[in-house]
Amino acid sequence: MLLEVAELTDPESIVGPVLVGGQLLQRRTSVVLRRMEAGPGGDLAREALAAFVPEQVPVLADRDGQRLSLPSALAAELLARVDRVESQVSRYQVGLGLLVEETWQLGGDSVPLVYELAPGEQAGRLRCQETGTPTATVMRDREGHLVAAALTCRYCLTASCGSCSAPAWPCGVCQIIVCGYCAQTPGDRAPRCPACRDLHPAGWLERRHYSRLLAPRGRLLLGRDTLHQVALVESMDGWQLLLTENGQDLPPTPVDADSAGIDLIERIVAAS
Ligand SMILES: [Zn+2]
Ligand SMILES: [Zn+2]
Ligand SMILES: [Zn+2]
């Protein structure tokens, strides 16, 4: 039986996935043999030997099962003989892929990334641990999940994905990104940020500050936390959301009467 190499991945040409904020320390590769169905035909044995011999291809084993590599001179001699083997010997086309094991440094941690490259494939991808989708860029969140996307809580500055406990999520009223711990809903994603949990009817001085927007007898709710102030102002055109960060008033945003947020706001207003 003869194995003809129809496709291969050269370890020198790997384009690995990227761990955001990390540094690649080490990469180890091992050959993965794959049977090819009626491949493209070209026998790439010479290229395979150039890429893998003598370091990579474990072609011999000694009595202890230790893997030994084939010296390149011997490999070249064998290759010349292979070309003279008679045609009745059955030939199989195979591809040489790679199993890649990388070690990355991220902060004080060492993070392993493992992926496989099919024969001929160069670009390594990892499966997002939240969605299962292959991705070329991964982030490591606060629970160690390697994911394609994670949200960073504005309050505690940690990143989390949907598989984390108490993950970060936009506040249902003001849309600031807040995690369940900082919103004090540790079992779940955060429905509201601390400021929006604090929303309460404003006093006369505060009403004066928002008088340009406020409808006559319109309602005004205010809430504050360490990052910002949230104001819900009932204007002539419906509810407006006004955020103040670092002492700066941001432009008002009308709350869409059809949005999911309006239900939440109506409930907060009714309860206050
Ligand atoms: Zn947080
Ligand atoms: Zn996660
Ligand atoms: Zn909020």
Image (tube, helix red, strand yellow):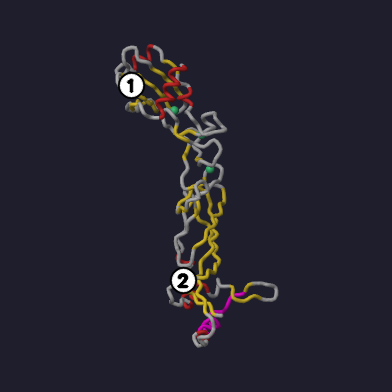
C-alpha span from label 1 to label 2 = 65 Å
Which numbered dot is residue 238? 1
Residue 78 lies in magenta, yes or no?
yes
Which residue is painted at 35% across and 28% down in the image? 256
Image position of 56 with respect to 249: above or below: below
Q: Which residues are magenta?
A: 68-79
Q: Which residue is mark 2?
A: 7
Q: Could you say whether the residue bearing mark 1 is in a helix, strand or loop?
A: strand
- Please tell me which of labels 1 and 2 falls first in the chain: 2
**On the rendered image, what quadrant is the N terminus found in?**
bottom right
| Residue 120, position as x, y percentages in the image | 45, 67
Q: Amino acid at mark 2?
A: Glu
Nearest the eye: 216 or 178: 216
Q: Is mark 1 within 8 Å of ligand 3?
A: no
Which residue is painted at 39% across and 28% down in the image? 245
Magenta segment's dominant SS is: helix
Residue 151 lies in magenta, yes or no?
no
Q: Amino acid at mark 1?
A: Gly
